[in-house]
Amino acid sequence: MQGRLSRKATLLVGTAALLMLSANPALAKETGGKETSKGVTWEDIRNDQETTDDVVSWGMGPRNHRYSPLDQINRDNIKGMKAVWSFSFGDEKQRGQETQAIVHDGTIYVTASYSRVFALDAKSGKKKWSYTARLPEDIRPCCDVVNRGAAIYGDKVFFGTLDAAMVALNKDTGEVVWRKKFGDHTAGYTMTGAPTIIKDQKTGKVMLLHGNSGDEFGVIGKFYARDPDTGDEIWMRPMVEGHMGRLNGEESTPTGNPKAPSWPNNDDGTKVEAWNHGGGAPWQSATFDVKTNTIVVGTGNPAPWNTWYRSGKDGNWQDYDSLYTSGQIYLEPSTGEPVGFFQHTPNDAWDYSGNNPITLFEMEKDGKTIRAGAHADRNGFFFVTDLDKLTARDGKISKQVGGAIGIYPFVPDISWATGWDVANGRPNEVEGQRPPPPKPGEKKGEVIEVTPNFLGGTNWMPMSYNKETKLFYIPSNDWSEEYWTEPVTYKKGAAYLGQGFRIKRQFDTHVGVLRAMDPTNGEIVWEAKEPLPLWAGTLTTKGGLVITGTSDGYVKAFDAKNGEELWKFQTGSGIVSQPVTWEMDGVQYIGLASGYGGAVPLWGGDMADLTKQVSQGGSFWVFAVPNELASAEPAEEPKTSTQ
Amino acid sequence: MQGRLSRKATLLVGTAALLMLSANPALAKETGGKETSKGVTWEDIRNDQETTDDVVSWGMGPRNHRYSPLDQINRDNIKGMKAVWSFSFGDEKQRGQETQAIVHDGTIYVTASYSRVFALDAKSGKKKWSYTARLPEDIRPCCDVVNRGAAIYGDKVFFGTLDAAMVALNKDTGEVVWRKKFGDHTAGYTMTGAPTIIKDQKTGKVMLLHGNSGDEFGVIGKFYARDPDTGDEIWMRPMVEGHMGRLNGEESTPTGNPKAPSWPNNDDGTKVEAWNHGGGAPWQSATFDVKTNTIVVGTGNPAPWNTWYRSGKDGNWQDYDSLYTSGQIYLEPSTGEPVGFFQHTPNDAWDYSGNNPITLFEMEKDGKTIRAGAHADRNGFFFVTDLDKLTARDGKISKQVGGAIGIYPFVPDISWATGWDVANGRPNEVEGQRPPPPKPGEKKGEVIEVTPNFLGGTNWMPMSYNKETKLFYIPSNDWSEEYWTEPVTYKKGAAYLGQGFRIKRQFDTHVGVLRAMDPTNGEIVWEAKEPLPLWAGTLTTKGGLVITGTSDGYVKAFDAKNGEELWKFQTGSGIVSQPVTWEMDGVQYIGLASGYGGAVPLWGGDMADLTKQVSQGGSFWVFAVPNELASAEPAEEPKTSTQ
């Protein structure tokens, strides 16, 4: 049998391959030599939020609004929306599909679990090419084998792999143009986030930006700028205070104070172990403020989770903020130097991290237009920060004082802080909410209950901003946890937490809540509850819609104004991806991946049990409103699929 | 979680169903007692082809017409057909999904690859329960880990597993009621076919019928009748002439002549090795002629494939038919005794096998109504047999003489026979088409080219019969192969073929052809060509439609009269399953599985390469025409999914 199987595998080239081409619509469009389509320019990316015929950046524009000016599909006709086609990622590989698709020139580029990329014909769903990274056995993704999307620029598609490499593929053929390994995957370095293309407004240089993941294994969070043509590193910026950056292959500057006073010293004056493995990984995608030429990216939790390893004598955490973790950092594109930082959770004791993207927007308040950043944090607070202050080149990195405009709870019953001193940028922490150290002779600390839990009031899944309603649409969860400390010592490749936990249900009625937040006053304008955790991003449109997916498999559309559920469709596996929309030949489409996984089923305690009913999957779906299809193609009958 | 799932599974009726609609469908539906729904009766199964609200048998009725009297979806409105929901089988298990769904009382029972069963809410696609057989590592399925469907009777769902067991599950909970291991999977015994429920018209006893697979490993093909309540065997009938049957736990009668003259002897008068491992496995499903109380089932190829091991001295194959392989056998339900047999390929030298079901129908010919059986064989010929003659209890098993009404080619360029002597039931074989034995001193025989190849003019995928058009709709393939003999000795668990092969493309234009056959004269009334092999069953309806799926992922609908392609939808993975249709709350639905696999990608040579572009998958899909949905629920807006 084996013999026969390998005989089967012996022919792929020559006439066989030609036959394959002639029969395969996906491969047939040859132009004599190489298939070509127009390249993606920086202007395409910069204008992504205004243009409707493509989606060429994660977040649908450098400011991550995830808003489309398309209104062909709208609150009046969405009841008639139908599936147009689906594509299976295949390979007997499933797990979490957290991707956001890129759409360009009739092709959809979608990443999938296990570091895969598929190029699909946007009309028919036929595969043009696919790429599967050959992953080593000893990768250490903390929270499932997910990938959150690709970047595109020129003739290349870029994505990060679970073995901590960045790969550039020819967008027309899927061939590897370059691959850069940037971290030791056996130490926990990995990559799940989507890279970002920006253009340094000073030098005119286009750059590929990306970070790493791995805080749960005690990595040092690093952010990279690369030449998209060659993959060569331009600079690298570590996110732990005092660690040394790199520029053009040379040591550049330490991040902040080289003595790292926000991390304690040992008695001998050396830094504590935690500083050497301090986390802060920028594992999600950057946004970019073109006006001030500033990169903005969230930084991950400090390592270990256990606060006492990062605190001073007698449990003094107040003087040790674990910079520059669990906050939003602002970087100069030419050099990677930090120019601003606002911390969401000083000396984070709860793995709140701070990664999900900072959405840049204009806010009308008190008759003024304020350039602001908005960020919904795992710690349960919604941060509106002053973009001009945070990007100011004033020689000061920390902008806690004066950096925030408003900080509002977006989930109920936050237990770790009663609120914020907004002017000074400090939370009003509740005593006893830091999991206490083990008592003498005990192996674990007292169990305390904390809300929200470390999976967060929200997590990685990006919110969207609708400039018509002026509301943010946050995929949030109401849940709590039991938390306790445990001793930990760094060991390469092993979990570096020092904390145990059990995720718990908070309300009988629901876990997930889609919330509409008014950034001017922190008001929750509406909410829509879900029985299972929400783990998908949101998309909002001029059509007055909010689109998202649910863990029990539905794509859903809500009225952006009042949260009314207008439409849903069951895709068969949980949805934890990011919807996008685009227009093609006069028809508006909505696309997203279905496939359940991510952190919840792995770490979610009661909530993981709750989601055991959900089938794994791995597929991409495209939807449209058929009547519109018909009116757009008046000469033909309404079509549900086109080849 | 099991607790939750089984709690979930406990209610389906009354207020519980309402709760399910209003809150979390997965968790809310409790009534305090056990979920119950009405049991399936023999009358339900017998009338399956007339009733529209359920599909309670493989083949949509004991005669396997795969015809539905539903016409709500029809050739005029099918252009508007849309996906209603999809369900992912999950588990990081994909490969071929060849299943036919059972639909009963609001639940869809669908089997999946790797011996899995899912019970789904027919309205919403929500999982009610699932069962996954724990398979040993050393199973030996020749042609992918497929399953072709379940049977249902009373409160139980029955299906066969790859480790050669039959399992009965409670249809409301998925709990195992009984499991019967019937073969040694390490010797190649396995099961992929759907079992069949019949009622012995003589005794009134309802029986569960099933066969086994494994001819490529030299098993003895056996057919079983069991008590559906207990799983206890009633009888077993082997398909190799002279092997001993069993009745009520005791030896009963040998199959045919105990001396097995259709298999050669060694010089010492013992039977040749091949006879001990002679194949003939009835690996597909039986049909049932209620009028004469006769089971009809196809038998598999003889083992080994190599004809010379089953021929007499000097290569005399003419006198050795390898009974009762590669034919259609007729059995008495009370005892399992053979009452008739018609062989499709005497002394089959090409692995043509003969398994796909014999469809029982009435044919008007020369002003008379003839009760007939129709069978499209892998060998390229379409057999119309005389049902009354083949079921006659006349003491003769072989009905070659006079058993056939018409035998017609349904694929072009059949090379192994020019046609048939219908009256005598013998093919006009072409000399030199049996792969010759190796010449002295050589290890393999001369390579010859044969059409069709062993994957067949058609294969397992069942055709359908439309009593309005009076046509059969055959999923067929045009392809050939290179064939040569090799020496072989039986070794338990090893392939027992004695033949090598390489599947080849026959035409540049196509491989698959959906063909409409007029059984009265063998005319191909229309054909629709496909670039890739066809490997899905067909369904036909009073709405004038033929529904099937393609290896490149489309569900397609054709005009039953002329073959015009009316509609298609891309499901994202290849379709190799069997569509069904049913009505629920006044709405007609069509359902089938998507997920590419089966024999072609494993054995198909050039054709396997051709299908490498196809993603694996594993999902069930339901379709309907939304306008009809709307008109059926006039008080509500058109809905695309209902919870």
Image (spheres, coloured by chain):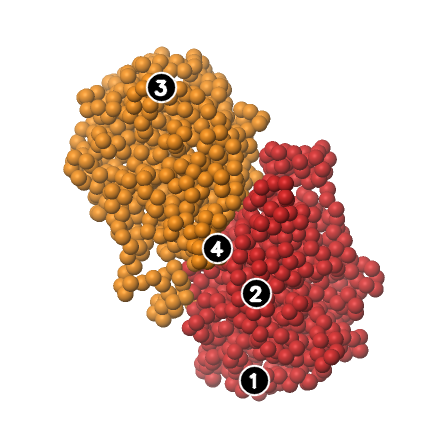
Chain colours: A orange, B red
Q: Earlier in the sequence, mark 3 or mark 4?
A: 3
Q: Alpha carbon of mark 1 to alpha carbon of mark 3: how far? A: 87 Å
Q: Secondary structure at mark 3?
A: strand
Q: Which residue is mark 2?
A: B559
Discs 2 and 4 share one subunit: no
The kind of residue tagged 1 is Thr
Q: Amino acid at mark 3?
A: Gly
**Alpha-carbon neighbours of circle 2 within 10 Å: few (<14), some, or many (≥20)?**
some
Chain designation of label 2: B
Chain identity of mark 4: A
User: In the figure, A539 relative to A429: above or below?
Assistant: below
B149 over A142 or under it: above or below? below
Q: Residue B79: x, y in percent?
A: 53, 57
Horizontal and vertical percent for residue A228? 23, 45
Amino acid type of disc 2?
Asp
Position in image of residue B478 (x %, y %): 50, 73
Relative depth, front residue between B623 and B490? B623
Q: For the C terminus of chain B, give its image quadrant.
A: top right
Disc 1 versus disc 4: distance between alpha carbons?
45 Å
Which residue carries the number 3 mark? A406
Find residue B418 and name its label.
Answer: 1
